[in-house]
Image: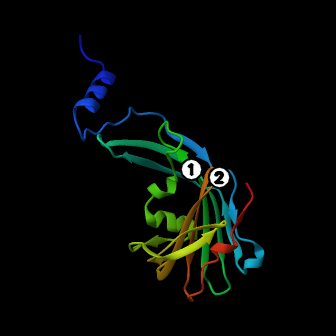
Amino acid sequence: MMPTRRGFVVACTAALTGCSVLPEESEPIEASAAAPAVLPESSGYSLVVEDSPTVETTVTVDFSGDVQLTSRQDVVATVFRRVYESPSGALFGLLTAPAVRVVDQPEVVRDPLTAVEDARVVSLATDAEVDAVSEWAERGSATLLGTETTRITATAMVDGSERTLVRARVRADEDAVTGIATAPDGNGAPFGAVTRSA
């Protein structure tokens, strides 16, 4: 009798260390963020974009151990976007994305924006044409929605001009919030002023 595909996969998992097992194809996960992160009017920034774009990507999860497993899942995520501008021209964008469960394990959830190219994420957050994003580097910490998180910086061409970027990301209930700021005048990014009503 010919072995079933399931039987072959199980045998492969049991017999070969390092065997990569890919799950069967499934329908894309469709998810929407629950509530947007926003910057209060008192921050000195003005709201210039308020919408809910759809982001399509493929999220990959790697499991290490005796056997290396990789799971890939297409995701269609509806993201809350808020873009703000300061009087000096600094931009501050907030992207609130649904944290999705890629495999059938409650603790394995991913922010779909981490699977999107950096230039695309910065473009979403700034509502600008973005390319040539440099490698991100850790530069201390920032507080976003009451949670201390890593602060990372890079440079990029934003609408044809080189800008310094500052980025921070946190989990917020069932969502993930990413804040990205451009700082043409060296001012600090207003991560600490961000609020959210779930």
For the residues marked 2 and 1, what is the alpha-carbon distance in whole angstroms?
9 Å
Locate the N terminus and report the quarter of the image it occupies.
Answer: top left
Most foreground residue, 174 or 14: 14
What residue is disc 1 on?
99
Q: Nearer the viewer, mark 2 or mark 1?
A: 2
Left or right of 18, for residue 104: right
Depicted 84 relative to depicted 117: above or below: below
Snapshot quadrant of residue 43: bottom right
Furthest residue toward top: 1
Tell me residue 64's x, y (percent). 34, 46
Tell me residue 124's x, y (percent). 55, 64
Locate the C terminus and report the quarter of the image it occupies.
Answer: bottom right
Q: Residue at x 28, y 32 (%)?
A: 13
Most foreground residue, 118 or 51: 118
Packing grade of label 1 (10 A; few <14, some 14-19, many >=20) is many
Left or right of 166, for residue 33: right
Kind of residue indicated by mark 2: Asp
**Label 2's element?**
loop
Tell me residue 99's x, y (percent). 56, 50
Depicted 118 relative to depicted 155: above or below: above
Left or right of 18, for residue 126: right
Q: Residue at x 38, y 34 (%)?
A: 23
What residue is disc 2 on?
173
